[in-house]
Image (cartoon, helix red, strand yellow):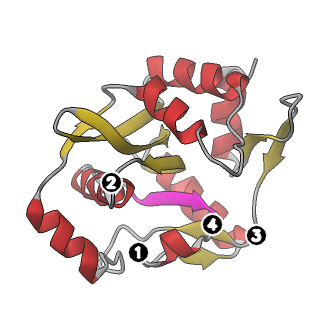
Amino acid sequence: MLTPEVLIGAYCRGIFPMAMDKRDEIGWFSPDPRAVIPLDDHFHVPHGLRRALKKNQFTVTFDFEFERVMRECCKRPEGTWISEEIVASYCQLHQLGFAHSVEMRLEGKLVGGLYGVHIGGAFFGESMFHRATDASKVALVALVERLRDRGFALLDTQWQTPHLAQFGTMEIPRCEYLRLLKRSIELDCTF
């Protein structure tokens, strides 16, 4: 099993794990360039999402159903990198206060969310899911607001995707990322 010490040490060096195949072999990654979502004014909320936010139809909670959010993130038609070992390891990180979830509810039912790892003033986004339109996007906006309010300096998304690009995700060279990471993990921020 991936121990909390191994995972935290890896994240502090800009490395993260993913299950690679049906045998649950773990691969370790440190992309170059690295994708980050700016926590300053460069974070962009798409126009259509602003309308959804105004409706205020979702109830947002944090760390209420961490394992369930992880398991919902596993349910992808194209497969997943989240193995049972990853679930168990991140649930252990959650129990220790290093992994967190954002849950979106509609009429009391869990319909979206995301989870990630928190060290100092850095948050490493791992995965998200939605079962209702805009649920994962609203979860991301809620996460950014929470990180801003609590003085975080880094929101790492690992890789650029079309979904994340609409929020102003930037790709930065690994060397720049590692400098930002070092400064961020030294901050004393609570999730």
Residue bearing mark 2: 135
The residue tagged with tag 2: helix, strand or loop? helix
Residue 42 in sight from this viewpoint:
yes
Taking depth in this image into account, of 31 and 52 the one nearest to the observer is 52
Query: For mark 1, does the 10 Å Cα neighbourhood hold few (<14), some (14 to 19), or many (20 or more) residues?
Result: some
Rounded to the nearest angstrom, the CA distance separating label 3 from label 4 is: 9 Å
Residue 190 in sight from this viewpoint:
no
Magenta stretch, main secondary structure class: strand
> Is mark 3 in CB contact (under 8 Å) with mark 4?
no
Query: For mark 4, does the 10 Å Cα neighbourhood hold few (<14), some (14 to 19), or many (20 or more) residues?
Result: some
Q: Earlier in the sequence, mark 1 or mark 3?
A: 3
> In the image, what residue type sits under mark 2?
Ala
Quadrant where the image shows the C terminus: top left
Query: For mark 2, does the 10 Å Cα neighbourhood hold few (<14), some (14 to 19), or many (20 or more) residues?
Result: many
Q: Earlier in the sequence, mark 1 or mark 4?
A: 1
Q: Residue at x 64, y 44 (%)?
A: 12
Question: Which residues make up the magenta segment?
Answer: 153-158
Rounded to the nearest angstrom, the CA distance separating label 1 from label 3 is: 20 Å
Query: For mark 3, does the 10 Å Cα neighbourhood hold few (<14), some (14 to 19), or many (20 or more) residues?
Result: some
In this picture, residue 1 sits left or right of residue 146: right
Quadrant where the image shows the N terminus: top right
> Foreground mark, 1 or 4?
1
The residue tagged with tag 3: helix, strand or loop? loop
> In the image, what residue type sits under mark 4?
Tyr
Q: Give percent across and percent down for residue 188.
A: 37, 41
Q: Earlier in the sequence, mark 2 or mark 3?
A: 3
Let me know if residue 31 is in the magenta part: no
Residue bearing mark 3: 32
> Is mark 1 in CB contact (under 8 Å) with mark 4?
no
